[in-house]
């Protein structure tokens, strides 16, 4: 039995689809089972990574765990699940981490949370694999509102470049790691096929949508303000802005060789991702 946490989120939900053809039994964890709308073939379990007692049912009889923690409490969440998984006798944990953990030049809050989280998982003693993806293509969904309203994308760091990755490719790589032997003790840097800046992404979206879009570089402060005005806690907005600044550093635009090896096919391009999600940007 494979436990998938973050099962209603971007990568966890894609992982459920990626595991379906393998026939492996999957248990999907969520804090809100009644509204999770998960596929009928998975067992749904209630669990909250912030509440260790709630994890007992989730890990029962599980031999492999996919761990998605989020935000500043991520390291505690990682520790809670790693401890529960060890008690339940799980054989492997695969944690969704972030690329920059492996780059000592980068030290923003999100990177620190994942570094501490990886250490917490190792402390639990269950053999672990760390999936370290770069920025997700799906982050562009946060632009849907201003694209629909103004045909415009407001985003800082015009000169930043990221080898953006399709979350479905992270899921495919994770399915390989969960279902094939020999990945314990590994940390995989996962980059997509092309290093893109925000203007490149906006150009690809315009092409797919068939109408011109404008890219406007805004200050990090303005981006922070927009995020908190739309309900993001200030600490998280600080972290997102600091993570954005790392796109100006070398190393964030890495090669896609590890991803290619794990998914045994060509990684998806941003244009492919945009074509498959065009409905999210239509007025
Ligand atoms: N976006 C990027 O560019 C990027 C790049 C590299 C790494 N990452 C990492 O990817 C992770 C996020 O993955 P994602 O985008 O797939 O997730 P997501 O779409 O943001 O969804 C978050 C998931 O976490 C679950 N969750 C939140 N709090 C929880 C709690 N206390 N207990 C149990 N489950 C909880 C939610 O489930 P319920 O609400 O159903 O309980 C949901 O399924 C983060 O660790 C992030 O740092 C992101």
Image (spheres, rainbow, N blue to C red):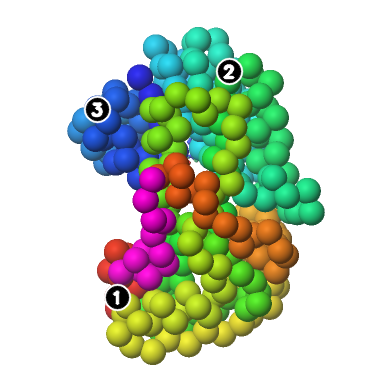
Q: Is residue 240 left or right of residue 154?
A: right
Question: Label 1 neighbourhood size at 10 Å, few (<14), some (14-19), many (20+)?
Answer: few
Q: Is residue 141 visible?
A: no
Residue position for label 3: 23
Residue position for label 1: 282
Q: CA distance from mark 3 to mark 2?
A: 24 Å
Closer to the chain start, of discs 3 and 2, is 3
- Residue 14's place in the image compared with 159, above or below, is above
Residue position for label 2: 126
Q: Is residue 44 left or right of residue 187?
A: left
* Of 265 and 86, the residue lying toward us: 265
Badge 1 marks a residue whose secondary structure is loop
The answer to which image quadrant residue 282 occupies is bottom left
Which span of residues is magenta-colored? 264-275
**Do the residues under discs 3 and 1 have CB atoms within 8 angstroms?**
no
Closer to the chain start, of discs 3 and 1, is 3
Q: CA distance from mark 3 to mark 1?
A: 36 Å
The answer to which image quadrant residue 21 occupies is top left
């Amino acid at each position: 039995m494979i436990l998938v946490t973050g099962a209603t989120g971007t990568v966890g939900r894609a992982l459920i689809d990626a595991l379906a053809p393998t026939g492996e039994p999957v248990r999907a964890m969520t804090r809100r089972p009644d509204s999770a709308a998960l596929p009928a073939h998975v067992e749904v379990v209630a669990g909250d990574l912030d509440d260790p007692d709630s994890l007992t049912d989730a890990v029962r009889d599980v031999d492999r765990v996919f761990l998605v923690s989020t935000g500043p409490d991520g390291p505690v969440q990682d520790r809670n699940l790693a401890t529960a998984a060890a008690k339940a006798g799980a054989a492997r944990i695969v944690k969704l981490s972030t690329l920059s953990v492996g780059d000592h030049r980068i030290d923003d809050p999100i990177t620190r949370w994942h570094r501490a989280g990886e250490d917490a998982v190792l402390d639990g003693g269950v053999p672990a694999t760390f999936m370290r993806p770069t920025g997700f293509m799906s982050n562009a969904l946060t632009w849907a509102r201003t694209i629909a309203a103004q045909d415009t994308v407001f985003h800082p760091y015009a000169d930043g470049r990221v080898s953006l990755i399709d979350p479905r490719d992270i899921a495919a790589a994770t399915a390989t790691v969960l279902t094939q032997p020999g990945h314990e003790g590994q940390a995989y840097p996962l980059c997509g096929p092309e290093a893109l800046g925000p203007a490149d992404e906006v150009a690809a979206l315009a092409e797919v949508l068939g109408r011109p879009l404008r890219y406007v570089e805004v200050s990090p402060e303005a981006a922070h303000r927009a995020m908190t005005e739309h309900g993001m806690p200030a600490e998280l907005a600080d972290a997102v802005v600091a993570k954005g600044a790392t796109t100006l550093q070398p190393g964030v635009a890495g090669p896609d060789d590890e991803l290619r090896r794990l998914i045994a096919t060509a990684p998806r391009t941003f244009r492919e991702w945009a074509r498959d999600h065009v409905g999210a940007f239509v007025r």
